[in-house]
Image (tube, grey):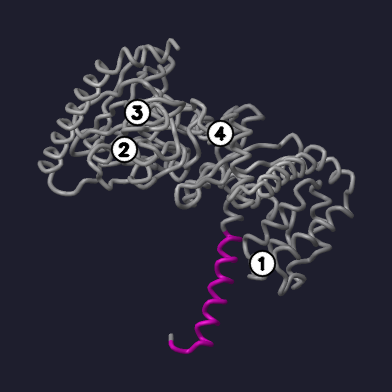
Amino acid sequence: MGDAAAIVDELRALEDRKSAIAARQARLSVALDLVRRREQAAAGVPGDKIGAGVGAEIALARRESPAKGCRLLGLARALVTEMPRTFAALETGQLNEWRATLLVRETAGLTAADRTAVDEELAPDAGTFDGAGDRTITAAARAAAYRRDPRTVTQRAAHAATERYVSVRPAPDTMCYLTALLPAPQAVAVYSALSRTADAARSDGDPRSRGQLMADTLVDRTTGTPGGISGISIQLVMTDRTLFQGDSEPVRLQGYGVVPAGWARALLTGGTGDQADDDSGQGTGNGAVSGGTGGSGGGVGSNPPFPVWLRRLYTAPATGELTAMDSRARIFPAGLRRFIQTRDNTCRTPYCDAPIRHLDHVAPWHTGGPTAATNGAGLCEACNHTKETPGWNAQPRPGPGRHTLQLNTPTGHTYHSTAPPLPGTSVGGSPRQRFNAAISSDLVMAARRREVRHRAKIQGPRRKTRSAA
């Protein structure tokens, strides 16, 4: 391993091998798709449902999200059936999987015949793109697609406006990326308006940077409230020790992920704001708190910038399992929905971390599955539909640990999903030590509740006067 040339040669050989493996995975994905389609057709599955669930099977096998699995299946179909020269370049290591994806993506609107013609024109397996970067490959494929079918390309551009959307994803250090896909004129107009406002504020002596001013203006204009806090519920899930005793156990911000304990405390006691619901959780054992903010008024700290409500969520001291809330209703009631969403955090399908859109009965309600926390799971929309495909089923797996469910695919493979740990459930030591810590936390919570009730009795008349005013 000391010979630099040998190291470089091995790196290149491994890269070629990765491309060949990606090509093999693509071929196997198409084979699975064909087998599944034949089986579903023989079973009488409606035509528009044939092929459903294959992308999810591929995703589980490759340890990817279901959305990524569907994209991988689409890539495989295009390469194997419509772009043989690009596929050959992938097999031989002349293209890696990402660059093959770029070629497929830029020819997506063409007919199968036109896509094959573009593939022949570019001839990637002949070394056309040796030394070329991503932009060069993308530009070449786009230009070839334009020449082949300019009308379809124009129609795609017109249709693209219907696919506009806004998304949010976490960034490091408690920040987020807010992304909007907009038609070009609207995007330019929004950016120009933010730029003009920022430039005017800078001219008036505002000390904030141009980027900060544009970001703050976007928040203010979108929410209608300076700072963006306008009564919207944003949940912080933390232990009582973190909230009241200065513990360093990280906090979960619903919809974002893990945030530092000190940052969350500052948020609740006088920093920038958030918001929470006004109702109670269930359970016994280790104390956890779901809290948040919004508006203006009293809260946890001595002078918080907005009201703060605490909802108590108790977890078993040894396992961190939230206790159940049962219902005879077909639809999960609001309190139970919040309970499951807090427990599951994101979609419970393995490798899928999409936001929860559906509350699903793991064992179907029409077969006797109860509307209970033990039989409920948070799923994204795509995973909930996949679960209803023939051959798929799921069931809760009882046990002493956190809520677990088992997912079975049509091939007989099984996958398990365990609810993520809540803050404070990974406390070290023996079960007895964790139990003692939980009892101590409960005592702190009880003392704090007495303090809050006492303060409410003293401040009640004064608050009523302010409200009346």
Residue 456 is left or right of residue 26, and the answer is left
Determine whether the residue tagged by mark 1 lies in a helix, strand or loop: loop
Q: Nearer the viewer, mark 4 or mark 2?
A: 4
Assign the C terminus to one quadrant of the image.
top left
Label 3 crowding class (10 Å Cα cut-off): few <14, some 14-19, many 20+? many
* Residue at which label 4 appears: 226
Q: Circle 4 sits in a helix, a strand or a loop, which is it?
A: helix
Q: Which mark is residue 299?
A: 3
Look at the numbered discs 4 and 3 and tell me whether their residues touch, using CB distance below 8 Å: no
Marks 3 and 1, the one that precedes in the sequence = 1
Vertical arrangement, residue 143 with respect to residue 280, above or below: below
Q: Secondary structure at mark 2?
A: strand
Q: Would you call the spot at circle 1 few (<14 residues within 10 Å), some (14-19), or many (20 or more)?
A: many
Tell me what residue is drawn at x 42 percent, y 32 percent. Answer: 305
Report which residue position mark 2 lands on: 238
Residue indicated by mark 1:
95
* Magenta span: chief secondary structure: helix
Whichever of labels 4 and 3 marks the residue nearer the N terminus, that label is 4
Bounds of the magenta segment: 2-24
Q: Quadrant of residue 282?
A: top left
Mark 4, Cα crowd under 10 Å, few <14 / some 14-19 / many 20+, is few
- Dot 4 or dot 2: first in sequence order is 4
- Tag 1: amino acid: Leu
